[in-house]
Image (cartoon, grey):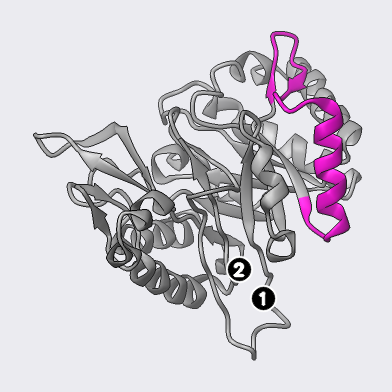
């Protein structure tokens, strides 16, 4: 989730797709997660809620005083949560996001500040009847926030347990370098952002990159397979003349398909690389074997 691209439940993007066999169905968790952007929440009315297990409100971030807010009007946010609950869909407050994390350090770098900030987070969740929080802290591995992140997560975990709330995180390899396995173990599940890979010169979200990401979090961070949720994009990005990922480019899967039926299964449209149906199906099969989950969709808007 880079600054210019946020995951949302709506018209054309992605989180990912695990499946499991019927023999494991009674044991494996079933998670279908989507992020609803607070700047474009109108598509909520078009969602098939029966196909989701979780909706994360993206994003709920602190003001200077450490009080969370988002840009969905209060009455509308409460209505969204209530409607989701009527379909047995859990709703989380997603904290952070690309470009939304710069104000967090000042609220967690001392025990006293963390205690006050954490109380504000819990008050916010109780006000809107959230079922949990999703930490999406997207800052480089050299940022000072990671010196306090483990303690912050430990304290939030205890507060969530007291309220029967869940806690998840959205992460990527470049984010997770200094997050320990012990900290990852505090989360109920982990949404792996296997897209926007700027090292690949052909596709920002290749099948091979998904394999690499799941292997990294499973082996290096010791996250159990049934806690991993693979993120996939329903959007594409292009490349500059020198082969670098063009962060200013964007094409939704819906836009690609609208240009011709052949683009439904293709992975490139007019120089924009994305995941077509064949690649998505391949990722679904692999994710099912690796994670024992069903499916997770993360739909993105520009």
Residue at 60 percent of width and 48 percent of height: 9
Label 2: state its secondary structure: helix
Q: Is residue 72 visible?
A: yes
Residue at 57 percent of width and 61 percent of height: 296
Q: Is residue 240 left or right of residue 127?
A: left
Q: Is residue 183 visible?
A: no
Q: Is residue 31 left or right of residue 196?
A: right
Instruction: Give neighbour class at mark 1: few <14, some 14-19, many 20+ (Cα, 10 Å).
Output: some
Q: Earlier in the sequence, mark 1 or mark 2?
A: 1
Residue at 36 percent of width and 58 percent of height: 257
Q: Residue 60 is drawn in which quadrant?
A: top right
Residue 4 to residue 90: above or below = above
Residue 184 to residue 156: above or below = below
Q: Is residue 129 left or right of residue 12?
A: right
Label 1: state its secondary structure: loop
Q: Nearer the viewer, residue 13 or 206?
A: 13
Q: Nearer the viewer, residue 108 or 251?
A: 251
Q: Residue 20 is drawn in which quadrant?
A: bottom right
For the record, the magenta segment spans 61-90
Q: Which residue is mark 1?
A: 28
Q: Which residue is mark 2?
A: 226
Give residue 82's position: percent from left, percent from top.
88, 46
| Quarter of the image that includes the C terminus | top left
Q: Contact, CB < 8 Å: mark 1 with mark 2?
A: yes
């Amino acid at each position: 989730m880079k600054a210019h691209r946020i995951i949302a439940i709506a018209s054309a993007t992605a989180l990912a797709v695990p499946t499991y066999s019927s023999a494991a169905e009674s044991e494996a968790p079933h998670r279908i997660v989507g992020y609803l952007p607070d700047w474009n929440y109108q598509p909520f009315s078009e969602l098939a809620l029966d196909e989701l297990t979780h909706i994360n409100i993206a994003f709920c971030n602190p003001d200077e005083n450490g009080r969370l807010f988002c840009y969905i009007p209060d009455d509308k946010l409460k209505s969204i949560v209530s409607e989701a609950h009527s379909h047995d869909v859990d709703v989380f407050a997603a904290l952070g996001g690309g470009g939304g994390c710069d104000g967090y350090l000042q609220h967690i770098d001392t025990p006293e500040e963390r205690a006050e900030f954490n109380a504000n987070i819990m008050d916010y969740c109780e006000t809107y009847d959230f079922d949990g929080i999703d930490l999406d802290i997207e800052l480089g591995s050299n940022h000072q926030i990671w010196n306090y992140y483990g303690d912050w997560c430990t304290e939030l975990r205890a507060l969530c347990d007291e309220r029967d709330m869940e806690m998840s995180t959205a992460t990527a390899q470049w984010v997770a370098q200094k997050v320990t396995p012990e900290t990852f173990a505090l989360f109920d599940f982990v949404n792996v952002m296997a897209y926007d890979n700027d090292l690949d010169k052909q596709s920002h979200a290749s099948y091979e990159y998904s394999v690499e990401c799941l292997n990294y979090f499973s082996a290096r961070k010791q996250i159990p397979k049934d806690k991993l949720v693979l993120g996939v994009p329903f959007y594409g990005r292009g490349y500059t003349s020198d082969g670098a990922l063009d962060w200013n480019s964007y094409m939704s899967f819906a836009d690609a398909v609208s240009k011709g039926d052949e683009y439904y299964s293709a992975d490139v449209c007019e120089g924009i690389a994305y995941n077509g149906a064949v690649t998505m199906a391949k990722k679904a099969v692999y994710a099912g074997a690796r994670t024992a989950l069903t499916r997770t969709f993360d739909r993105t808007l520009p």
